Amino acid sequence: MITIEGSHGTSVTRATRIQVSGFQLGTGRAGTGVYFWLGPYYIELAVGWYRFLASKNEFADDENPTCAIIIVDVKAGESEVLNLEDEELKNEIALVVKKQGINPRNKTAVAKLYDSFIMRLEEKFKVKFKAIKIRVGIPPLEFIRDYPISVVGAPMCCVARDTGCITIKSMRIIEG
Amino acid sequence: MNKETLYAAIKSVAVDLCAMSKEEFDKELEAHRDGDIAKLLLETKALDVGEIEAELFDYYSVPYAEARHIDLCNFHLDSSSSYVVGHHSLKNLMPSVMLSTVSIPVRSFATLTVGWSRQATSVRLHGPIQMSFFTQGMPGYKMTRVESYSITRKISVEEQESFSYLSANKPFSINDEQEYKLAA
């Protein structure tokens, strides 16, 4: 069993609801899953992401739109966590890209290939990946000025695909 | 199930996908148009990360004077072989890149071209120098050779007791055969 500590930025209203009812798997634009920031800057990233969403009025209708950061543990068996940054995995996918002549700049095609690859991998490996670790883009810099991308690179995030593996540890309210 | 089993499965999936005809493969991709992983990758800009990070290659446009103070000191000289090996930092030049190993046949002169990306760091070899790098604080990133490079330096090796000191002097081009011969 491995434990991954992560953070999730949202409003106090929503965080309170999550504390009571737990995380719900949404089927939003980014697919099914709950997203958590990882690494030493996980609080800053969660706050940055909250601020980014707040700038788009995401929380405007919430009773208490103040920023809240939920800290969680994602727990799953070692074989139930897939690291999409794994070198072996990337190399094999790159091999398919090359063999099948996919234009690497065609991100839609590459994304579909990853999807196919992971689904097939789950089938072969006879496992359902409950959590996926992946390096993602950072929130716009104006919302997270101090993130040292030149030192740590783009941030890692964990996508929990099974809410049963999420344990809420604490909640912090960030004023201002 | 362990990593070996996972990697065997990964290879097996790759073999299956590679073996598909173009028609089959196109159908396979189309079937995953709305898959969760596909959405995840597109919406989180995960596939853009490499390109975003590549912008850090602006290092390459840094004026030479700002990048000339490479200090590769304290190389341990292994007297039992013709190589010096050490662990050194290029922090002053490339803050997130650590030079992890270097082996240099003991000669008075050599040249190298150093380049790096967020995902890979390598050197283009001119003369008898071998180096490998890792990106500091990024354990997922492995040593991989790439062909990108930009910084060319003349490296002189001076032996002092059991250590060798390397220092960057001035820009040097391997094409400058005359200078190479003079220095060598």
Image (spheres, coloured by chain):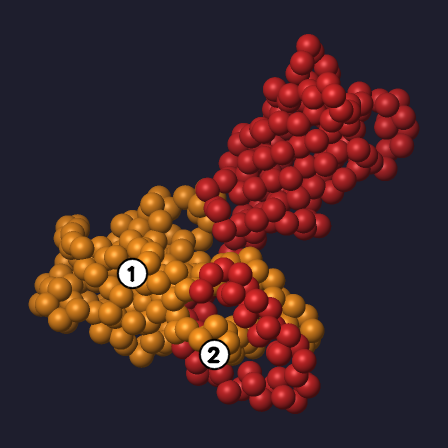
Residue B80, picture quadrant: top right
**Residue placed at 59% from the left, 34% from the top?**
B99
Q: Which residue is mark 1?
A: A75
How far across and down, in percent of the image, does residue A82 sit? Answer: 43, 64
Give the structural element (helix, strand or loop) at label 1: strand
Name the disc covering residue A166, or none. none
Vertical comparison of B120 with B49: above or below: above
Q: Which residue is mark 2?
A: A123
Q: Chain of mark 2?
A: A
Q: Are marks 2 and 1 on the same chain?
A: yes
Quadrant occupied by the N terminus of chain A: bottom left
**Crowd band around label 1 with a 10 angstrom C-alpha radius: few (<14), some (14–19), many (20+):** many
Amino acid at the residue labelled 1: Lys
Give the colour of chain B.
red
Closer-to-camera residue (A37/A144): A37
Q: Is residue B13 left or right of residue A41?
A: right
Identity of the residue furthest to the front in this view: B1
Vertical comparison of A18 with B80: above or below: below
How far across and down, in percent of the image, does residue B54 sit? Answer: 56, 53
**Residue placed at 63% from the left, 49% from the top?**
B144
Give the colour of chain A.
orange
How far across and down, in percent of the image, does residue B36 sit? Answer: 40, 77
Q: Chain of mark 1?
A: A
**Residue placed at 59% from the left, 35% from the top?**
B100
Amino acid at the residue labelled 2: Glu
Give the structural element (helix, strand or loop) at label 2: helix
